[in-house]
Amino acid sequence: MGFPVPDAELAATLAHRLGEVDLALEAAVAQADALADDVARHLVAAGGKRFRPLLTLLCGELGDGSRRELIDAAIVVELTQVASLYHDDVMDSAPVRRGAPSVHSVWGNSVAILVGDMLFARASQCVAELGPEAVKIQSRTFERMCLGQLHETTGPREGEDAVTHYLQVLSDKTASLLATSARLGAMFGGAPADQVEAVAAYGEKVGVAFQLADDVLDIASDGEVSGKTPGTDLREHVPTMPALLLRRRVGSDGTAEDAALLAALDGDLTSDEALSGVVARLRAHEVLAETRALAQKWAQEAADELAPLPEGPVKTALMEFATAVASRTV
């Protein structure tokens, strides 16, 4: 599964329920039109870690985890995630997603955008079955995801702190859907209101921690272990926390060495030699350790949000996931 569940009985229950989600997800993306059906199934068939539906099912165990509404809620969050990937990959020109060719690289940008819209529509149909409160939650989340993508694309406004801006992008674009995954799970499992709010806050903070850890991995990972080429984001000049922290240093009390590294970072990184050189220098720089410490801070704050939850296997699994996020290697 997407994250560790130490309790064997709970892990088996969640694995079974996740299998139900996968079957229902296949039915949810099915389209009458042959082309739309092929495109809609593409990323769902590719798999993925299923973090969001798993979080929904896990938080549902705070109440009655057998409720059918939890399967529907898990489908909603996964459909929303998959649909957003169709759009993101167009904007980022990403060639691969979940180990498979990205949709736009196979069928083109227009088809990818239109089918992404169709999947959002299917998510809306599913969430409507859960009632008006769920519709409000999902629509607010979708709005935040769009704002996060918009602000990532346009960058910080003049005078706005780039690090603060970036953290807000992470909260909106990624963490908001994790928060909603946890919220819908606890809500439709029938957990008390304070526990619903606790896991939603947890999801928001653990989502930011996850993305910060991803920034560390982009520089520090072993490509053979992670399956990701170190420095991929750097090569594309995608803003990440280590680069932003370095830029902040150069703008205040940075050294000549800092300025030289930033110039290399902003330069042409198309050659493997240039990229590996910059990656090696960043691995040895303090900004990487600072980013790792930030990820750990957000993960700890996420764990702290779980105080209202009763002791037991659900709380333990959520705590262990927060710990794993801060030290992840893949």
Image: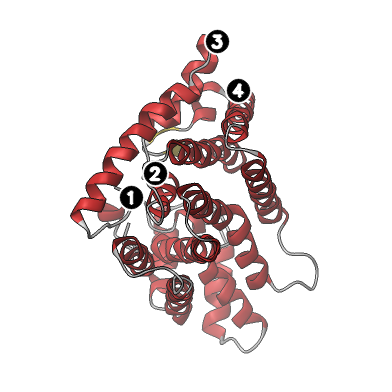
Q: In which quarter of the image is residue 133?
A: top right
Q: Nearer the viewer, residue 84 or 54?
A: 54
Say which amino acid is labelled 4.
Val
Say which amino acid is labelled 3.
Asp
According to the image, label 3 marks what residue?
Answer: 33
Distance CA(mark 4)–CA(mark 2): 24 Å
Q: Which of marks 1 and 2 is nearer the N terminus?
A: 1
Q: Residues within 10 Å of mark 1 (few under 14, many from 20)?
A: few
- Which residue in the rendered view is the most extreme toward the bottom? 253
Distance CA(mark 4)–CA(mark 1): 29 Å
In the picture, the quarter occupied by the C terminus is: bottom left
Q: Which of marks 3 and 2 is nearer the N terminus?
A: 3
- Residue 27, position as x, y percentages in the image: 44, 22
Q: Are marks 3 and 2 in contact (CB under 8 Å)?
A: no
Residue at 42% in and 40% down: 67
Say which amino acid is labelled 1.
Gly
According to the image, label 4 marks what residue?
Answer: 111
Residue at 51% in and 54% down: 178
Residue at 30% in and 46% down: 14
Q: Earlier in the sequence, mark 3 or mark 1?
A: 1
According to the image, label 1 marks what residue?
Answer: 2
Residue at 34% in and 32% down: 20
- Residue 290, position as x, y percentages in the image: 47, 79
Q: Which of marks 4 and 1 is nearer the N terminus?
A: 1
Give the structural element (helix, strand or loop) at label 3.
loop
Q: Residues within 10 Å of mark 3 (few under 14, many from 20)?
A: few
Give the vertical position of 263 relative to 170 (above or below).
Answer: below
Q: Do the residues labelled 1 and 2 touch (CB within 8 Å)?
A: yes
Q: Is residue 100 left or right of residue 40?
A: left
Say which amino acid is labelled 2.
Arg
Q: Nearer the viewer, residue 221 or 295?
A: 295
Give the vertical position of 33 relative to 187 (above or below).
Answer: above
